[in-house]
Structure formats: C-alpha cells, structure tokens
C-alpha cells in the first residue's frame, strides 16, 4: 500500500492499536492531529506522557491515582465499613459518576478467566481479604455481569462468607429505559428469577 | 463529576476533542493508555510529536509530506499531464490505496463553503491554475459528492474550461455492492441521470 509519509503511517499504526479504533478511524484521527495546531497536538502527546509518569495504583484499593492512598481511601466522610469490589479502575469512575455510593472500593485488576490464564493470584484478592479484618461490614460484588465476572463474584462470595461479613451482588435485570421485547434471553430469565415483592 | 486524577481527566479531555471520539470512548482509550506498557504509550506520544515536527505540505500539490516536493510529485513514472483535484490529504491516501490512478494530485485544503467563511482565496486554487500552464491535459475534479464539494467542482470547472484543458468530474451513482432499495433519493436520481450506454 502507498504510504504518504513514514511518520504519518507510524502514527496511524500506533492509533490503530487502541481498542475500537480500526484502520479507517486511525487514519481520520491521524489527519485530525495533522490538522490541529502544534500546541493542541503536543498537549495530547504530553497528556499521554503525564498519565504514564504520574498515575499509580493506590496501595489500599488499587484504583488509579496520583496520590497514595487515593482520594477515596483518604476521604473520612465516606463509609469505610462498606467495600464495593470492581474489576477495573474505569468501573470506579462509572460508579462515582452516579454519585450515590458513599463507601470504599477495591479494584481487582480483572476477573477470573482460566482460558486467559488469569487465576486468583493474578487479582488483588489477598489484599481484599486483608482489608476485611478492619471492621468491614459489607462487601458489594460489582464485577461485570458476564461469565468471568459471575465466576469471580462466586469465588469471592465463598471466600468472604465464612468471615461473617455480609456479601451482596449488584442486581441484574432489565436495563432501565430498555425494551422488554429487545432484552436477551439471559437477562430476561434473570429479571424473572430476581423479581421483587411490591 | 468525580475525577479520579487530574492527569487522567486531562487525558480524557484531550482525547475527547478528536473527531468521532465521545466521552465514553475517550475514557476507554485513556484507560487503555494507562494499561499498556510505558514504552507503548510513549511511542504513541512520540508518533504524535513526530508528525507535527516532520510533516509539511508539498509546495507543488499541497499533499502532506516529509520531503518537498512529495514522493508523488517527484515520481517521473507518473503522468504529469493529468491532475486529480481533491479536498484533503486523506483523499489522496484513499485514491492511492486503490492503486489505479497514475497521474498527479492537487490538494485544495477544503471546499468552498460561504457559511463557514471559506472562499476561493482560502483554498489552493491559484496554485492549481499556475500548474495548468505546464502541459496539463486533464483535470479530474474529485471533490466530495456533497453540497460544498459540488459547488467547488462547478467553480473550478468554470475557471479551467476557458484554458482549453479537459475537465472531468468523478462519477456519482449507486455505490458498488450497495442495494438500490437503500440508496437515498439524490443518489438514485444521479444514477438515473448519468446512466451509460451498454
């Protein structure tokens, strides 16, 4: 294939490595970067460098942070007796965006997936169990509602229950605003099974 | 809204400025950048810096290039009597990808758009006319098949025709592999009007 310039095709290749960015989107993004001002392009480049230099994992909850412990773990107005367990740092961001939850978090760093070679030792499970001795009353399992997330939740439930800590799982059912007609079979089954008394 | 870290939200903001990248995609890309190795993230950052430092416009055809004149303008095996006029450098890339065209190009740098304040002086039209005196036999107008592109093609046609140079326009009609049923009205009208003898 014809390449207009080495550095452009290098940029397109780098952009195309990102998730959800195919070769056409990568090309469009590259030409956008070529079109904007020097300042704006460099500000994107330096934002990438900055996160890689500054951002670390919180030593308590393993969320991404610039300060250690992170802003949530240090916040004394939050309820430290409740820990919400999620797979990835962006799950924390999604939950914080709704602004309803006032407890702490624990980021596992993934989900159990034997096929991908991810076992219990690859996740921050030991560190979660260590935290439970510090007066934690409830662990909310908010791993993803897919095969790996469910397996991880089940595994954690079996580990935590004997420690006399309340273990809950986020509700699964029909998405709010969705259409019953378009719900998949697994969701519909779950919505029926977990129906609540009115 | 809660922000997990200043440098992360700065990166998300920078990514969200790109075309076709909404806030959710920007977040996903940011967490991808946080997840990959230091090397890979810095290689993206330096690819961005490199294009801004190295890539310039070709002084002949205004395509993007690292060398001046560009690789197409310097290529003596290409037909210098035919010039294909396009709006943007990525149009050159799209045409070169099919590998059928062996002539030269001229990148206008946009299309006429009075509403956006883009007039003839904002495009590389004067430079195109200057090139025509050098033995050019045909100008193929390959501006986009939308309102601005059509207006630009019409404008150029009126300028170039009196110079006794052949002026052609890329064909508009049903996209190959498409469905007649799903074609929009304007395309269908054009496909009928421009029907060819078999």
Image: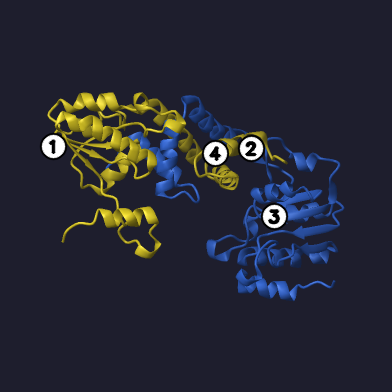
Chain colours: A yellow, B blue
- Label 4 resides on the chain identified as A
Frontmost of labels 3 and 2 is 2
Asked if marks 2 and 1 fall on the same chain, the answer is: yes
Q: Residue at x 57, y 65 (%)?
A: B114
Q: Which of disc 1 and disc 2 is earlier in sequence?
A: 2
Residue position for label 4? A15
Q: Residue at x 25, y 28 (%)?
A: A128
**Inter-mark Cα distance, 4 to 3:** 25 Å
How far, Cα to Cα, is label 1 from label 4? Answer: 41 Å
Report how far apart the C-alphas of labels 2 and 4 lie in the structure: 10 Å
Q: Nearer the viewer, residue B160 or B153?
A: B153
Left or right: residue A40 compared with residue A190: right
Instruction: Give whichever of discs 2 and 4 has the lower sequence position.
Output: 2
**Residue A37: x, y in percent?**
52, 43
Check the residue under mark 1 and report the chain it is in. A
Q: Residues within 10 Å of mark 2 (few under 14, many from 20)?
A: some
Marks 1 & 3 on one chain: no
Disc 2 to disc 1, C-alpha distance: 50 Å
Image vertical order of residue B190 relative to residue A156, above or below:
below
**Which residue is identified by label 1?**
A77
- Disc number for residue A9: 2
Q: Are marks 2 and 4 in contact (CB under 8 Å)?
A: no
In percent of width and height, residue B22 lies at 43, 50
Marks 3 and 2, Cα distance to the nearest angstrom? 20 Å
Query: Is label 1 in a helix, a strand or a loop?
Result: loop
* Residue at (70, 67) in percent of width and height: B173
- The residue that disc 3 covers is B86
Q: Label 3's element? A: strand
For label 4, count other residues whose C-alpha is less than 10 Å away and answer few (under 14), some (14-19) or many (20+): many
Tell me where residue A66 sits by quadrant: top left
Closer to the chain start, of discs 1 and 4, is 4
């Amino acid at each position: 294939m014809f390449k207009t310039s080495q550095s452009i095709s290098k940029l397109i290749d780098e952009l195309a490595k990102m998730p959800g960015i195919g070769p056409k989107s990568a090309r469009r993004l590259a030409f956008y970067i070529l079109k904007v001002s020097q300042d704006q392009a460099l500000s994107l480049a330096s934002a990438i460098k900055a996160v890689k230099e500054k951002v670390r994992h919180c030593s308590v909850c393993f969320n991404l942070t610039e300060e250690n412990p992170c802003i949530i773990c240090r916040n004394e107005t939050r309820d430290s007796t409740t820990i919400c367990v999620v797979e990835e740092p962006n799950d924390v961001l999604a939950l914080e965006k709704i602004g309803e939850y006032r407890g702490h978090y624990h980021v596992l760093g993934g989900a159990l997936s034997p096929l991908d070679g991810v076992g219990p030792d690859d996740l921050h499970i030991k560190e979660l169990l260590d935290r439970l001795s510090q007066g934690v009353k409830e662990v909310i399992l908010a791993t993803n509602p897919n095969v790996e997330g469910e397996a991880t939740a089940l595994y954690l439930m079996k580990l935590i229950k004997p420690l006399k800590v309340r273990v809950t799982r986020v509700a699964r059912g029909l998405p709010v605003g969705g259409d019953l007609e378009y719900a998949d079979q697994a969701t519909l089954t779950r919505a029926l099974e977990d129906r609540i008394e009115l």
